[in-house]
Image (cartoon, rainbow, N blue to C red):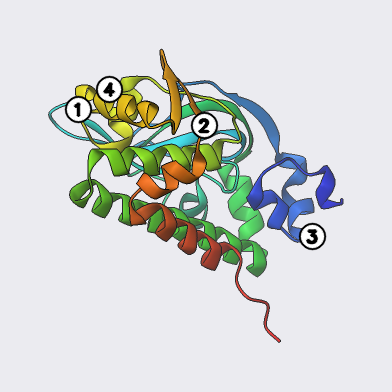
Amino acid sequence: MDSVSRPPNGFLSALTTDDFEQIRPHLRTVDLTQDLVLVEVGQVLKRAYLPHRGVISIVVDLSRGEHVQAGLVGRDSVFGAFATLGDPVALNRAVVVVPGAASTIDLDRFRAAADSSATLRTLLLRHGMTVFAQIQQTAGCNASHTVEARLARCLLQTHDLSGAGELVLTQEALAQMIGARRNSVSLVANTLQQAGFINYSRGHIRITNLEGLRKTACECYATVRRHHERLLNPPVPP
């Protein structure tokens, strides 16, 4: 099957024809509704998700009730890469932060296909490493950078991964994404709007100046993009 007819997901687009044909009969399309919890900490992940649109948030839940986003998975990748290759017990909660749609596949089917294909295993590993690199960078970012820079970084990442022209994100969701208090998010979002970088009203966010937002974002946005490019677009050997 030609790649043009594949679902619009970066992982699926990168598969060889043979690898895609292995999993194609087992793929089905599901809606990713906002705030849908895909797995809780300690649960066994039973399905992998490959977004066409929308974004999945990987969330760390703390004992005092705080929820902090550690990473994002969108239309360029797959949620469940490492679970397919190893332990399926979830280390974090996964929740849909931007609604959309995804292809999904039973994890046992996905694992069986990966067991029989070195190229599929390699691609899963690279996608898993990309998410892991993002999680590491996010931890450093939340510890070191200003709320304004973190919010700009997170809005850019979410915009890139979602495929949506407008993001619907509550103050609570934004606070969770950058590890900040809701009142801080409100103040900074207003600052970004006054600068002409975003239009923000009742949880609806439209980026109106990408270049301005990129200049406001911390180094972490570009760093994650470099990791993404290196891991998912390796040079072709001569």
At label 3, counting other C-alpha atoms closer than 10 Å, the crowd grade (few under 14, some 14-19, many 20 or more) is few
Tag of residue 186: 4
Give the alpha-carbon distance from disc 4 to disc 2, as whole Å: 18 Å
Which residue position holds label 3?
18
Q: Amino acid at mark 3?
A: Asp
Give the alpha-carbon distance from disc 1 to disc 2, as whole Å: 25 Å
Which residue position holds label 2?
208
Above or below — where is 119 with respect to 21? below
Q: Amino acid at mark 4?
A: Ser
* Upstream in sequence: badge 4 or badge 1: 1
Q: Is residue 96 visible?
A: no
Element assignment for label 4: helix
Tag of residue 189: none
Give the alpha-carbon distance from disc 4 to disc 1, as whole Å: 9 Å
Closer-to-camera residue (190/151): 190
Extreme residue in the top direction: 202
- Corner quadrant of residue 64: top left
Q: Nearer the viewer, mark 2 or mark 3?
A: 2
The x, y position of residue 132, in whole percent, is 39, 56
Give the alpha-carbon distance from disc 2 to disc 3, as whole Å: 42 Å
Q: Residue at x 51, y 52 (%)?
A: 81
Extreme residue in the bottom direction: 238
Q: Nearer the viewer, mark 3 or mark 1?
A: 1
Which residue position holds label 1?
181
Above or below — where is 121 with respect to 146? below
Q: Residue at x 24, y 36 (%)?
A: 179
Element assignment for label 1: loop
Closer-to-camera residue (179/212): 212
Q: Tell me whether the residue at label 4 lies in contact with that at label 3, contact meaning CB atoms closer than 8 angstroms.
A: no
